[in-house]
Image (spheres, helix red, strand yellow):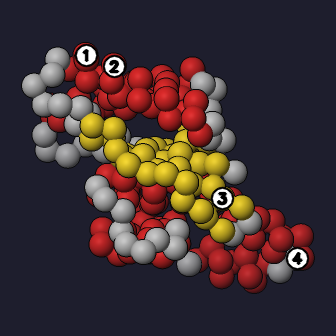
Amino acid sequence: MRILGIDPGYAIVGFGVVSYHGADFTPLEYGAITTEAGTRFAARLTAIYDDLDFLLKRFQPDCIAIERLYFTSNQKTVIDVAQARGVIVLCAEQHQIPMYEYTPLQVKQAVVGYGKAEKRQVMDMTRRILKLAQIPKPDDAADALALAICPGQCAAAEQLLSRIHKAGDTIGYIVYMEN
């Protein structure tokens, strides 16, 4: 399975493409789509769309993992990020690629195993899972790679639950769900 992780923004859109097979993740490419400050906002959205369209055609992912937008204190920023995210969702929909949304808490849980992990812990575990020599830069790309790991981790958990259920091991199921 090929997964594209996206950390949405309007100045920087982090992306990370991974291949997931069995329990192994292999990074294929990562980086950032950037737009220049001072450029008309509509032109920035167009650039995000065009670059993402290129990535989708190039890598043909089976699914996309994107960070669910959450509100902080700056209303202008959240509205602009929401518009950029809308362009990303539109592009994915036009390519008919399933999209999965994850909160920062869910990403931390999937990558580190602890929903209150520090950002540095998530970045280091992402590096370890992908067997990279160093933490990817920019941070937006590292975040996108962490997002790309989520569907694979969820698929692995579903497979484990299915095996436990078929074996009739309800105690294992309960213990697994409590972690």
Task: Give the residue pinned by disc 2.
Answer: 46
Of tags 4 and 2, which is closer to the observer?
2
Q: Say which amino acid is labelled 4.
A: Gly
Q: Is any part of residue 117 visible from this angle?
A: no
Is mark 3 in CB contact (under 8 Å) with mark 4?
A: no
Marks 2/3: CA distance?
A: 30 Å
Is mark 4 in CB contact (under 8 Å) with mark 2?
A: no
Marks 1/4: CA distance?
A: 56 Å
Position in image of residue 54 (x %, y %)? 49, 29
Residue sitting nearer the eye, 29 or 107: 29
Q: Say which amino acid is labelled 3.
A: Tyr
Q: Earlier in the sequence, mark 4 or mark 2?
A: 2
Q: Secondary structure at mark 4?
A: loop
Q: Say which amino acid is labelled 2.
A: Thr
Is mark 1 in CB contact (under 8 Å) with mark 2?
A: yes
Establish if 143 lies above or below 57. below
* Other residues around mark 4 within 10 Å, as few (<14) / some (14–19) / many (≥20): few
Position in image of residue 60 (x %, y %)? 63, 36
Q: Say which amino acid is labelled 1.
A: Ala
Task: Give the residue pinned by disc 3.
Answer: 20
Q: Secondary structure at mark 3?
A: strand
Residue at 53% x, 50% y is 17
Q: Earlier in the sequence, mark 3 or mark 4?
A: 3
Marks 3/4: CA distance?
A: 28 Å
Task: Give the residue pinned by disc 4.
Answer: 168
